[in-house]
Amino acid sequence: MSRRASLWVGWIFATLVAVGVVLTWMTVGGDRKVLLAGEMTDAHHQIELACESCHAAPVFASAAAAKKALNKACRNCHEDELKDGDDSHPRKSFRNPRMAAYWEKLDARFCTSCHEEHRPEITLTGAVTVAADFCVACHSEGEQDVRKNRPSHAGLTFETCASAGCHNYHDNTALYADFLVDHADQPWLVPDPVHVLSARQRSQEPASEATLERADAMAPPDALNEQATLDHWAGSGHAAAGVNCAACHAPEVEAGAPLSDIEAAWVSAPPRTVCRDCHKVEARTFALGRHGMRQHPEVSGPRDATGSAVGDVLPEAIMAWLSDAPHPAHMTVREARVPMRGAAADQSLDCGTCHQPHAVDTKRAAVEACTSCHDDLHSRAYVGSPHHALWLAEVSGDAAAGTGVSCATCHMFKAKRRGRIVTSHNQNDGLRPNEKMIRPVCLDCHGLGFAIDALADDDLVAGNFRGRPTNHVESIEWAVRHAASADRDEDR
Amino acid sequence: MNPISRKLATLAVGVATAMSAASAAADEVPYSRVADMLYQVMSADREAYTRMVVQRLTVDEEVITASEHFEDDVALPLPAQMFRFGAELVADESEDFSYALLSLDPINKKNGPGTDLEREGLEFVVDNPGENFYGEEELGGERYFAAVYPDYAVSEACAICHNEHKDSPRTDIEVGDVMGGVVIRMLMD
């Protein structure tokens, strides 16, 4: 064989091997990190190896089917959030064929039209991958020309629509015109600033007849020797609510079972699932945020190559090598892309990270748990801020329940669900954009105008609201002017 | 059977008939006939909601209001909103047909005519009281049959709301006026 022919054979062989390896990684198993098309966004990087979570279509599906599956995957995790925010541009509004002319400009039927993954070079805040003036695509011509419909907008440029504190593409629940008008002329601080749901939740007393004492603890002798743990439990909300040791350490054992049954079923370090059995809303929302995303039920697990089509053909050792490594169950502080404390780098995020398993001290979870890891300007500035001072006053008993403002007050706020007050454990609920926080949090204490201005002032946010906003968003004045009948005629 | 039950039963039969007719449109029933049947169902549904829910609870019984911001105001959705919610649910589930309530003078600009045929149809139903408009158009690379039906201000409440809304381009609507039109589209073969 000539040298040239040998080279050709070698090249073809190497190519086939490379293609085979890539196809195997794609369809069977193996470390696919090398196949990542580009760095993932801050929102999804921690599930970057769970490819099937988003790329749900079969490997050789058509481009259209793959796109549909990709967008359905977005909705699997984000649909509830969009509903809660009364999505201003819901997908269903754009599916009517009368919107076809808009499909060519910006196809709002698909999330990926504005939020492409693996495109770090063009990714803006909020994982947006279209130019900041994207509103121009649909609101600059004909009947939809906002500059004609709203004389106040005549001189504005489109990159300011979403960046100046006036509009969001999805969630405008605190920014729509009639809401602005209804909340015009509010003082910066209401007369009795109290976060109502926090106050109501903190003042709820557990049923006294259910409360357990230290002596009521039922556990194996070794566990009962851990005095500090027993003390913590006896002073916890669990003991106050009648939750004995076995509820978490021997969850399979029925209430009232003898100690021997409890000892037989005892688990020293129970998994998080035992928390979820009782704290369903908290567990569900935890998995929706960046702290617990890896535990979201729609996030795909590692692939087991032995169960694949070639599982019976190739030797077991090769199949074991091909199988995906187990995906890490929890996010670690080290992996975070926001500034974190070095000392906390090895900390992983689970219920027990913020809630000490026996003490279940929600006050610690509301502040110290956050500041022990987060090291950004806003977090650092919290200690000593006006909000922190209010929190210290509440915790010390000098001020009423609900008057303090902890990290959790704003980032894990309370909500009413079917008559119950629950704490959202999705720390992203009120962020990106931060105006999502206005209605569930800010308005209990502050006027709408002040809240909009404060959240639009990046320096004020970084300084944890020490001082007053230096910018003013004029949206309320414009909405009021438009609503007034005299100006309405002028607008026309 | 009481009148309400009879009306609901009629509606159910109407929906079933229209849906099965929609699937058979290409082979047996003319598109215009299918559109007419769909419109009958939509129109009856809307009238039932307006009279039996909105009118009864807001005007007759005065137990709740109806509001554009029904969630914030803990009120009933307006009849036009209910109509739109139904249209969006259909759009979410099916590509075979779609419908919308549009106007040449919409309160919400997105409900203005979006295609040449929509404009032509809306102008036709305004200029020709009592008549419907039928036509065909191509959208997004697909051929559609479209029908436009006049939408009247059937009560004083319709006229007042539209005349007084801060975003309404018209302030002179009277009972009996055509305020807009229901546009129904069907995907053709």
Image: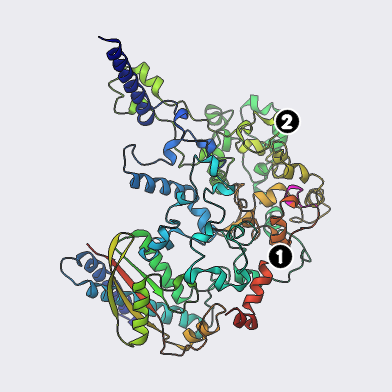
Q: Which mark is residue A363?
A: none
What residue appears at the point 44 percent right and 74 percent down from the top-left corner? B112
- State the CA–CA distance, disc 1 to disc 2: 49 Å
Point out residue A439 in the picture as x, y percentages from the top left corner. Answer: 64, 61
The mark closer to the camera, 1 or 2, is 1
Q: Quadrant of the C terminus of chain A?
A: bottom right
Residue range in magenta is A461-466
Residue A185 left/right relative to A307: right
Q: Residues within 10 Å of mark 2 (few under 14, many from 20)?
A: few
Is A457 rendered above or below residue B5?
above
Instruction: Kindly identify which residue carries mark 1.
Output: A449
Point out residue B28 in the picture as x, y percentages from the top left corner. Answer: 15, 69
Q: Is residue A296 in view?
A: yes
Q: Name, please, the residue furthest toward the right.
A: A398
Q: Secondary structure at mark 1?
A: helix
Front residue of A207 and A389: A389
Q: Quadrant of the N terminus of chain A?
A: top left
Front residue of B33 and B139: B139
Is A396 rendered above or below residue A375?
below
What residue appears at the point 69 percent right and 66 percent down from the top-left corner? A474
Point out residue B27 in the picture as x, y percentages from the top left corner. Answer: 16, 66
Instruction: Kindly identify which residue carries mark 2.
Output: A228
Instruction: Respond whether the residues carrying marks 1 and 2 are from the same subunit.
Output: yes
